[in-house]
Each structure stands twice: as C-alpha cells, then as structure tokens.
Amino acid sequence: MRRSFVAIVCAALLSVTAVPAVAAERTDPRQAAMDAAVAAGIPGMVAVSDDFRGASGVANIARPGKPDASGRWRIASVSKVFVATLVLQLVAEKRVGLDEPVRRYLPGLLPYPEPITVRQLLQHTSGLPRDLATEDTWASGPEVDTERFEHFDSDDQIRLSVTKQPLQFKPGTGWAYSNTGYNVLGLLVEKITRKSLERALAERVTGPLHLRDTSLPRDFPFLIGAAARGYEQLYDAPRGLTDVTTYNYSRYFGAGGMVSSAKDLNRFFEALLGGRLLPADLVAEMRKTVPVGGGMEYGLGLMKLNLKAAGACAEDISIWGHGGDLPGFATLSFHDDSGKNISTLATVDITASPDAALKRQLPMISEFCAPVVPSTRAVAQAPVPSL
C-alpha cells in the first residue's frame, strides 16, 4: 500500500492527447492497454470484466507463460471495502453506531482525547496516522525484502502507530488516508462479533457469495493459485527484480491483507452495489462522499472517481470501487452504475516507472471510455508520490 492510484492519475494527466485508435479493429482496447503497460516495464497484467478476460506479459520472469486471468493475487487496499461492508452489516444489526465514538467499543485503544467516530474511520476523516512510524516500518527497498516474515497481532500495528504519532488533524476536519484506521475497524469487527476477522468475512461475505478465491491469510505467507508472481526493483542495478510474492502481511490485517481474484472482486462489487450485502439505506450511506481532489471522492470504504475530472476520459463518467497497492501487486477494481465492471492486476507496484505506473491504469479506464493519456514529456516530468 505504497502508491496512490488517484495521485498518479492526477499528477500524470495534466497534459493530454488522445490515444490513437489505429489498432482498434484488430485488438481489444483493454488488451492493447495491457500490452502497452508490459512494454513500459510491467512484468505481467491481468484484466477481467463481464465481456473480457485477458492477460499480458509473463506470470514468472524466470520462465515463459502468461499470467492466469483466473488466478489469485494480493488485493491490498481493496480489502478495505470488504471490512467496511462488515462494519456496516453490524450497523444494520444495531450492534454498532455509525456516529458513535469508537472508544465505546474499544476502550483504551486510542490515546487521543478527541472522540473519533466509526464513520470517520470508514471515511478517512479521523485524522489517525497513516501507517507505522518510520522506525517501525520499511525505510528502504532492501527492507521490503528482508522484513517479509514479521508477525503483527491484531492490535500491534495500531498501538505502535498511535502511541508514537499525533493525529494528523482534528477528527472530522480533514481527509487523509489511514491504514491504521482500517486496522482499528478490523479489530472492531472482531470485538463485536467475537470472531476473527477472517471468520467473520467467511461467514458474512465470501461464503454467501461463493467467493472461493477470496480470503484473509494473515500470517500465511504463500500465495496459492497465483495469477502471477509479484516483483519490485528493491536493489540498485545490476541486480534485477526481487520476487515479493511470498510475504506475511499481518501488519495490514484490516487495511489490506486479503487475497482474491478478478472474478471474485467483480462478483463482490456487483453484490455490494446491487444491495445484496447491505440494506439500501446503508448502501446510500456508503456512497455519501467527501472530496479528495483530482476527480476523486471517498465514501464509507468506497472510492468514487470522475474520469473526466481526473483527466482520464473526455466523457463525464463516474465509477465506484477501490485501488490497492502492495509490493508486487497493484490492483484496480471499478464499476459504474450501468453494470460495467473491471478488475486488473499489475505485478510491479512501488518501483514502477512513471510511464509504467500510468499505463497500468489504462486497461481499467478502457472499460469505461476511450482514454486520453499524457504526452511523453508530461510522463517524464510527472511526480510519482509515495503512499
């Protein structure tokens, strides 16, 4: 969870030119966009929508063979939508109050005197620190490699984060993405249900929807049935890409630790936005957004992206979903109100070049419009902020 999808879009799409349509008759635009991302340096990509299932590049840089469009990968912050759904189910059952302070349910967890509500945690308006303090997390590329088997209990990351760092702002007065906040929400689900988060997910969401590829592995580091291996350039040349597929992401248990597949993600969002997981009034609450900037708004665990305001499309199109970023795995899963949906994987995330980081988003955008892309000069100059 180290790179911001919207931040890259907004930074890169400042100068735009239309994508040439020369090959439109020969190649599906989503496939063409994946091929362009691979040519720009992404080892492998997968994209799946209702009428398209494709892959490009390789699943493993050590041998030939395309990624498996039916396979699993680490979905990172797309996990937040699942956790938000669980919390809102508890709201529907009157076991949690959206506007109640979280200290009512988890007394003593947060050291701040200011009350922080469940809604603020869901919407990233709590002001909680984003992640661990610098001394407790990755400070370099090599550390991403060497710290891959570190275990965190459910409250470890929270306590380390909040006891060493102040609030970013007074709760309810701003917006700032917080993985710590979603770990608090994961702990809230465990406290109220008296079950582990993975069991609550299985009983309430993945089981009823028959999402057989979706799970929260917590300490289990291996990726079974992988769509592709994940890679990063963690060391200076001449050393090549490092395989970061095998990893313990218990530090992000509520914020981004889940595994899924494109098929499962599309089915989940169709059920969620279609009212099969929550009552209509809570789906409406989920879609009440605050502005973030660059065409993006954030609801209760949901991103809303206006593709025209983001500079990605000429048409005024809004889509709902979430992006996810972890070492080796960049996920986009977005859906519009007409029923179109797409989920994509790219297998380099935090060390992708600006050009590759932009182009890996175009397969998703191509589902909803003919995208516009920046000139070569704009790509070269665009900053790539770190999440």
Image (tube, rainbow, N blue to C red):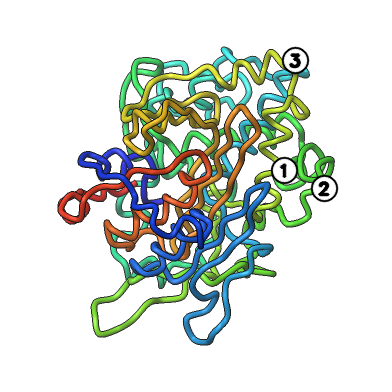
Amino acid identity at mark 3: Lys
- Residue identified by numbered label 3: 94
Q: Give 300 or 172, whichever is nearer the viewer.
A: 300
* Mark toward the viewer: 2 or 1: 1
Residue at x-position 68% and y-position 69%? 224
The picture quadrant where one finds residue 238 is bottom left
**Vertical order, 18 against 58 (above or below):** above
How far from the left and from the top, in percent, is residue 13? 27, 41
Residue at x-position 61% and y-position 31%? 84
Please, what secondary structure does the residue beneath circle 2 have?
loop
Q: Are marks 2 and 1 in contact (CB under 8 Å)?
A: yes
Residue at x-position 50% and y-position 26%? 121
How far from the left and from the top, in percent, is residue 47? 57, 56
Instruction: Measure how far apart labels 3 and 2 are at the Cα level.
Output: 26 Å
Please, what secondary structure does the residue beneath circle 3 have?
loop
- Residue identified by numbered label 1: 267
How far from the left and from the top, in percent, is residue 366? 47, 46
Please, what secondary structure does the residue beneath circle 1 have?
helix
Q: Give 333 or 181, whichever is nearer the viewer.
A: 333
Q: Callout 1: few (<14), some (14-19), or many (20+) C-alpha neighbours within 10 Å? A: some
Q: Earlier in the sequence, mark 3 or mark 2?
A: 3
How far from the left and from the top, in percent, is residue 260? 65, 54
Q: Earlier in the sequence, mark 2 or mark 1?
A: 2
Instruction: Measure how far apart labels 3 and 1 are at the Cα level.
Output: 27 Å
* Mark toward the viewer: 3 or 2: 2
